[in-house]
Amino acid sequence: MSKSILSIDDLSDGDLDRLFCVAKEIKAKKYSKKFEAVMMTAFFEPSTRTRLSFEMAAHRLGIKVSTFTKENSSMIKGEDFRHTMSNLKALNPDVLVVRAEQKLEQGLSNIAVINAGDGVNEHPSQALLDSFTLLEHFQCEDLYGKRVLIMGDVGHSRVARSNIKLLKRLGASIVLLSPTGNIDDLEHVNNFNDLLGNFSAVMLLRLQKERIKDLSSYPKNFSLNKEKLFLKLKNCVVLHPGPMNIGEEIEEDVANCRESLIFRQVENGVHMRASMLAHCLS
Ligand code: NCD
């Protein structure tokens, strides 16, 4: 069977250690292994960072890239998602990186599938690069003693779901500040003013407008500005998976402040995704 990564749950503690370790080696240019393999990307939802960083990662490892684009595929002629996926697998790439509107299921196949975000379910590569960025920033091997605030549209966020699983595994404690509900019975508040204590990091989430039926119920003024960051979240680093909606969940002054690790996340995304490809192909 292939080594797919559909969920953080597919990775053992040993896998996590190796993924972080190899990503670090790749970043330090101490990893020279090349792969005779083809990666196919199939994105059924829009993407900038995730697709391009998988493609950049593949190029760095000598992996050939084949790209499916929904807009000029036979889906326009009526072929559905399930049949499209069966055909992409029949083309036999060594690894298939998929972003879908629905939850991905592991079929019986020799092809390794990497989940690049499936509906509201999971986004494991984002969580891995987020934790890699935090471990690098704090220069530690785990996140015990770190308190992470996840702020925004948690209820519809696959980024939050994968991050919660991984941050917990690494020992972090998590607080949710979200008008769209709780996950996993975590500590949860609805208003910024109800937050207590200090945080090591705040992870901002975009309002998933494409997944919310009634946007009018989402509160205005839910964005993080510099005043809030400094008054309440002193010394706390800022993460955001992108795409940022400036003025909605984040203000420009926060996106570009000293505490922002947002572009470091993008850079690390290439290294972590290269590490994931190496994991799946080894
Ligand atoms: C996220 C996604 O697509 O889930 N973005 C990303 O992959 N960098 C977050 C989002 O769309 O809000």
Image: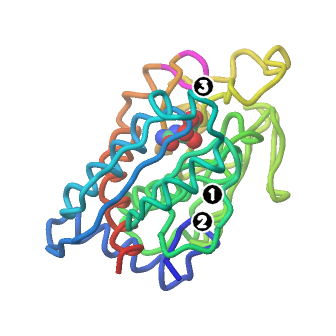
Front residue of this view, candidates 99 and 132:
99
Determine crowd level at label 1: few under 14, some 14-19, many 20+ residues with C-alpha closer than 10 A.
many
- Is disc 3 placed on a helix, strand or loop? loop
Q: Which residue is mark 3?
A: 249
Is residue 115 among the parts visible in the rendering?
yes
Q: Tell me the distance, in whole angstroms, between the alpha carbons under discs 1 and 2.
A: 6 Å
Some atom of ligand 1 lies within 8 Å of the CB belonging to the residue at label 2: no
Ligand 1 location (quadrant): top right
The Cα–Cα distance between marks 1 and 3, rounded to whole angstroms, is 20 Å
- Residue 240 in the image, given as x and y percentages of width and height: 50, 39
Amino acid type assigned to the residue bearing label 2 in the image: Leu
Vertical side of 197 occupied by 156: above or below: above
* Front position among marks 1 and 3: 1
Give yes or no for contact between labels 3 and 2 (Cβ–Cβ under 8 Å). Answer: no
Q: Earlier in the sequence, mark 3 or mark 2?
A: 2
Residue at the front extreme of this rendering: 77
Taking the spot 24% from the left edge, 57% from the top edge, the residue there is: 64
> In the rendered view, would you say 46 is above or below 68?
above
- Quick one: SS at disc 1? helix
Q: How is the image coloured?
A: rainbow
Our reading of the magenta stretch's main secondary structure is loop
Q: Position of residue 74 (x, y in %)?
A: 52, 34
Indicate yes or no whether the magenta region holds residue 44. Answer: no
Q: Is residue 223 above or below residue 258?
A: above
Q: From which residue to which does the magenta span run?
A: 247-251
Residue type at mark 3: give it.
Glu
Q: Which mark is on residue 162?
A: 1
248 is within the stretch colored magenta? yes
Q: Is residue 280 left or right of residue 83?
A: left
| In-image side of 255 versus 29 (left or right) | right
User: Toward the viewer: 127 or 264?
Assistant: 127
Residue labelled with disc 2: 166
